[in-house]
Amino acid sequence: MAVIVPYFGEKLPGGTHNAYHREIITLIDQYTAAALHIEALFQLYKEAVELQRSLTRKVSASSYTTDIVKGNELCDLWIRTFIAVQKAYIIAPVGSDTRKHAEALKPIAQAYDGIHRQEQSKQTTETQSMLEKIRSNDTIQAAITALGLDIVISSLEEENERLEENIRLRNREEAERKILFGDNTATKQRAVVNDLYKQIVERVNAYAIVEPTEAIENFIVHVTATAEYYANIAARDNKANKPNLSPETKPNPDESKEEDKTDEEEPNDGGSPGVV
């Protein structure tokens, strides 16, 4: 009686490994878990494969990461623009209005020079502090307007608020993911799926030997064909060694006993034992 040679998808990428097991689930549904004697195991297996699928789809980086990176770059540019303009105008002739306005901005420019190199959350906090100092001082505000920096400050304010919000949303998303999945990962769940599939194969193989049915035999053929397909993918794309997945033939215990009994009762062609 042929039995399944288990294939666990070695060297298959996470998504492909999950696709392989979802195909196995389809085959089990086709032949029914009851006919294969794996009802309880099948439910656990399905749940494990679905969780693996969710974990595989989960992007390691937050969906807000791109927005945060972009927003951080914009804030950096506006901060550097403000600092650069102040430094450019500070060399204006002494006594000129331009020099006077640049002098008014010098304390803030010096205090906050380099904040664009800070960690994102610290940068947004310090940027907000700088903006508050600018907005709360009439002399500084007048200097900002006189040097044509209103658009720079308003743009920085807008981008900084957006960056802060995206950081909050990213942290909230990560917390929700932690609640949903805990410390589980696609790699850990892959091992769980493989272990449950191993148990399914062992149980189906046991029944294939002692109580073979057409459903079990056909299931073995289809499982083997599916495993062959994915093993070819692993060998082609990931240099995996192609295993021999041809169904192994195991003797039926009852048939083995009958053969042994026949051998014991077979008469000696040379006559009675011991006669020459």
Image: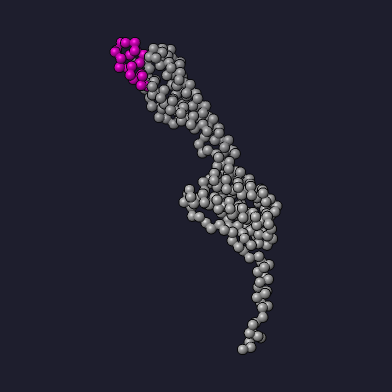
Tell me where residue 204 sits by quadrant: bottom right
| Residue at position x 65%, y 50% in the image | 28
Q: Is residue 58 visible?
A: yes
Query: Residue 13, image x and y in percent?
Result: 51, 46
- Relative placement, left or right, of 149 versus 209 is left
Query: Residue 115, image x and y in percent?
Result: 41, 27
Q: Residue furthest left?
A: 93
Query: Residue 153, image x and y in percent?
Result: 43, 19
- Classify 57 as above or below 72: below
- Relative placement, left or right, of 43 versus 127 is right
State the extent of the magenta-drawn residues as a range: 83-102
Q: Quadrant of the C terminus?
A: bottom right
Count every numbered label the image shows and give the total.
Answer: 0
Q: Does the magenta run of residues contain 100?
A: yes
* Main secondary structure of the magenta stretch: helix
- Classify 145 as above or below 187: above
Q: Quadrant of the N terminus?
A: bottom right
Tell me where residue 202 sits by quadrant: bottom right
- Classify 84 as above or below 251: above
Q: Which residue occupies the foreground of this view, 268 or 106?
A: 268
Q: Which color mode does the image show?
A: one colour
Q: Residue furthest front?
A: 269
Q: Does the magenta run of residues contain 133?
A: no
| Residue at position x 65%, y 69% in the image | 256
Tell me where residue 116 sits by quadrant: top left
Q: Is residue 111 visible?
A: no
| Residue at position x 67%, y 49% in the image | 30
| Residue at position x 30%, y 14% in the image | 92
- Relative placement, left or right, of 161 versus 44 is left
Q: Residue furthest bottom?
A: 276
Query: Residue 270, image x and y in percent?
Result: 63, 84
